[in-house]
Structure formats: structure tokens, C-alpha cells
Amino acid sequence: MWTAEQRCLTSLALLQPMRDRLAEVVTIHTGHADQIAALETRCRTSAFAANRATQQVEVSGRAVTAHAKRSAS
């Protein structure tokens, strides 16, 4: 029994600091949850805009290439 108790006490001594640190992180995260949500929304919006811009560049590139070929003929 003593060995099992000692093992548990050792585990507890190792895990308590981790628990305390995680509690700090949760508190930090909770305090900024609305900011994080807003930034995630902005990130998704920016990614969508970047994707559309890339598509427009590709279309424009094809149009310029086609025009250059017609002009060269």
C-alpha cells in the first residue's frame, strides 16, 4: 500500500504544476476569446479574398496571353 501511495504522491507532485500552468492558459484564452474569434473571422475573410484575387490574376493572365498571341499574328 505504501508503494502505491508513494507513486500517487509522486504523480501528484509532478502533475500539480502542469495543472496550475494550464489553468493560467485557460484564463488567458478566456480573456481573449472574443478577440480570437474576430481574428479567426478576419483570417477566413482574408483567405477568401486572396483566393478570389488569385483566380482573377489567372483569368487576367490568360486574357493577356491570348491578346498577345492575337497581336503577334
Image (spheres, rainbow, N blue to C red):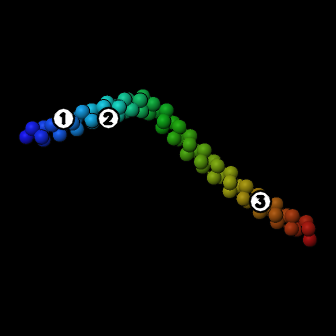
Q: Is residue 37 visible?
A: yes
Kindly check if marks 1 and 2 are in contact, taking CB atoms under 8 A apart as contact. no
Q: Residue at x 42, y 33 (%)?
A: 29
Left or right: 23, with 33 as reference point: left
Kindly check if marks 3 and 2 are in contact, taking CB atoms under 8 A apart as contact. no
Tell us which disc is closer to us: 1 or 2.
1
Q: Quadrant of residue 19?
A: top left
| Position of 16 relative to 55 (above/below) | above
Secondary structure of residue under mark 2: helix
**Looking at the picture, how far across and down is residue 31, in whole percent?**
42, 28
Residue at the extreme bottom of the image, as rendered? 73
Name the residue beneath numbered marker 1.
Answer: 9
Residue count near mark 1 (Cα–Cα under 10 Å), binned few <14, some 14–19, many ≥20? few
**Looking at the picture, how far across and down is residue 52, in whole percent?**
65, 52
Name the residue beneath numbered marker 3.
Answer: 61
Q: Amino acid at mark 1?
A: Leu
Q: Residue at x 59, y 48 (%)?
A: 47
Secondary structure of residue under mark 3: helix
